[in-house]
Image (spheres, helix red, strand yellow):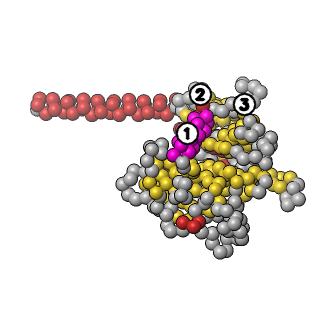
């Protein structure tokens, strides 16, 4: 009997101990919940955006469109107590009267601080619009307590049109632009010393036309060179006004797309005012294959979207397109291709600097910050330009 009484006492102690432990755990959990104030979600409602347009007569006008605010993700930094959108809303978005949906942890209460008096608070309601044109303070109060934390809300809106390109005149080149121009000049001089006409470079090597008209390539500053392979259209190789550009081919980091343009004498093709366009694919690792140079013949139905003969042209790869800048007749013009040189059109975005002499050729390079640097040696002027959205991530 004493033995059973002892066992019963031990069992009772274990039960009491477990009950005590569970009770303490529940108490701790309720304390944590009761004292934890946090915003868990933040979503914008429907937004309005003012758009600008130009009529066929050149008159400017505006119209309004709606945007789904829920498509713009907001980050919540619980350590720094910040709420913000890393990707800014489009230019022209009105955020002065916006409905928002705010989610909290454990039914925390949310109060909006006044823009003029931090001690004036308004209880959050999903039915009341907020002025989010400047940073707002959100006071989050833990359920059932007076404890609170304050989040700073920033709704970022782009102040520039993403597809707007602008130039600024410069008095000196950046170090990077100067290096790029120097590299081009060095290649040109090395080619000339070898009696070659320099065309351009890729990661494979440098290209030039030999005195006999052959297209050749070198990897050692024109100490040695080899004839390039062509697809057979040798009579369509350019004989003057060459330009070349090379860039990564699609998502293949080891493959270059090399594009070359140039002209043949009008005496040879008097009926055609189009430039000669060639391309090749280069496997820079040398493991797979390298394509021959291919002449990009203009389709019979492509009567307008071709590259005209440009005098002293420059090719640039920029914003997933290739720009061709050169003298079309007596006037400097900018053309662009979005399909690797198959079709071309005059660019409506990439205009020339306002102070440029449009009767003179230019040189141009692109730096690592996505600026286009343009130099006009005959006037001694230089400019720097960038598409607005190309600078948003820098």
Q: Position of residue 346 (x, y in %)?
A: 73, 57
Q: How many numbered marks appear?
A: 3
In three-dimensional space, the C-alpha distance between marks 2 and 3, rounded to whole angstroms, equals: 55 Å
Question: Which residue is pictured at 74% across the width and 28% down the height?
Answer: 120
In three-dimensional space, the C-alpha distance between marks 2 and 1, rounded to whole angstroms, equals: 66 Å
SS for callout 1: helix
Question: Which residue is pictured at 88% across the width and 55% down the height?
Answer: 59
Which quadrant of the view contains residue 328?
Answer: bottom right
Camera-nearest residue between 251 and 278: 278
Decide: few, some or many residues near mark 1? Use Cα within 10 Å; few <14, some 14-19, many ≥20. few
Up/down of 254 relative to 276, above or below: above
Label 2 or label 1, whichever lies nearer to me, is 1
Disc 3 marks which residue?
171
Camera-nearest residue between 238 and 19: 238
Comes first in the chain, label 2 or label 1: 2
Q: Are marks 2 and 3 in contact (CB under 8 Å)?
A: no
Residue 266 located within the stretch drawn in magenta: no
Decide: few, some or many residues near mark 2? Use Cα within 10 Å; few <14, some 14-19, many ≥20. some
Magenta residues, start to end: 177-194
Disc 1 marks which residue?
186
Q: Position of residue 297 (x, y in %)?
A: 60, 69
Question: Which residue is pictured at 75% across the width and 25% down the height?
Answer: 117
Disc 2 marks which residue?
148
Decide: few, some or many residues near mark 3? Use Cα within 10 Å; few <14, some 14-19, many ≥20. few
Q: Which mark is residue 48?
A: none
Question: Which quarter of the figure is the C terminus placed in?
Answer: top right
Camera-nearest residue between 181 and 193: 193
Report whether residue 68 is seen. no
Comes first in the chain, label 1 or label 3: 3
Comes first in the chain, label 2 or label 3: 2
Q: Position of residue 292 (x, y in %)?
A: 47, 62
């Amino acid at each position: 009997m004493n033995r059973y009484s002892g066992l019963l006492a031990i069992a009772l102690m274990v039960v009491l101990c477990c009950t005590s432990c569970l009770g303490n755990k529940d108490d701790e959990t309720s304390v944590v919940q009761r004292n934890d104030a946090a915003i868990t979600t933040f979503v914008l409602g429907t937004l309005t955006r003012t758009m600008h347009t130009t009529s066929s007569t050149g008159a400017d006008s505006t119209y309004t469109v709606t945007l789904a605010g829920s498509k713009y993700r907001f980050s919540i930094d619980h350590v720094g107590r910040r709420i913000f959108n890393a990707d800014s809303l489009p230019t022209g978005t009105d955020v002065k009267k916006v409905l928002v949906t705010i989610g909290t942890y454990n039914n925390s209460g949310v109060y909006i601080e006044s823009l003029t008096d931090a001690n004036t608070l308004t209880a959050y309601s999903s039915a009341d619009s907020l002025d989010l044109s400047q940073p707002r303070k959100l006071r989050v109060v833990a359920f059932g307590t007076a404890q609170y934390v304050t989040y700073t809300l920033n709704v970022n809106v782009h102040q520039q049109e993403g597809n707007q390109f602008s130039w600024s005149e410069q008095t000196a080149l950046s170090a990077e632009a100067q290096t790029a121009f120097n590299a081009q000049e060095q290649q040109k001089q090395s080619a000339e010393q070898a009696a070659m006409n320099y065309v351009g470079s890729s990661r494979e090597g440098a290209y030039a036309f030999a005195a006999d008209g052959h297209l050749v390539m070198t990897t050692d500053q024109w100490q040695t060179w080899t004839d390039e392979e062509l697809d057979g259209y040798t009579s369509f190789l350019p004989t003057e006004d060459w330009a070349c550009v090379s860039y990564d081919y699609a998502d293949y980091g080891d493959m270059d797309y090399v594009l070359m343009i140039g002209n043949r004498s009008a005496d040879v093709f008097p009926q055609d005012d189009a430039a000669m366009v060639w391309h090749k694919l280069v496997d820079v690792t040398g493991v797979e294959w390298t394509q021959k140079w291919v002449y990009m013949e203009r389709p019979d139905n492509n009567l307008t979207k071709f590259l005209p003969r440009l005098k002293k042209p420059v090719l640039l790869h920029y914003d997933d397109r290739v720009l061709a800048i050169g003298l079309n007749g007596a006037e400097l013009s900018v053309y662009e291709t979005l399909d690797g040189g198959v079709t071309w059109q005059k660019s409506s975005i990439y205009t020339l600097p306002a102070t440029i002499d449009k009767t003179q050729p230019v040189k141009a390079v692109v730096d690592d910050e996505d600026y286009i640097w343009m130099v006009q040696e005959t006037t001694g002027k230089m400019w720097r330009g960038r598409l607005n959205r190309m600078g948003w991530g820098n």
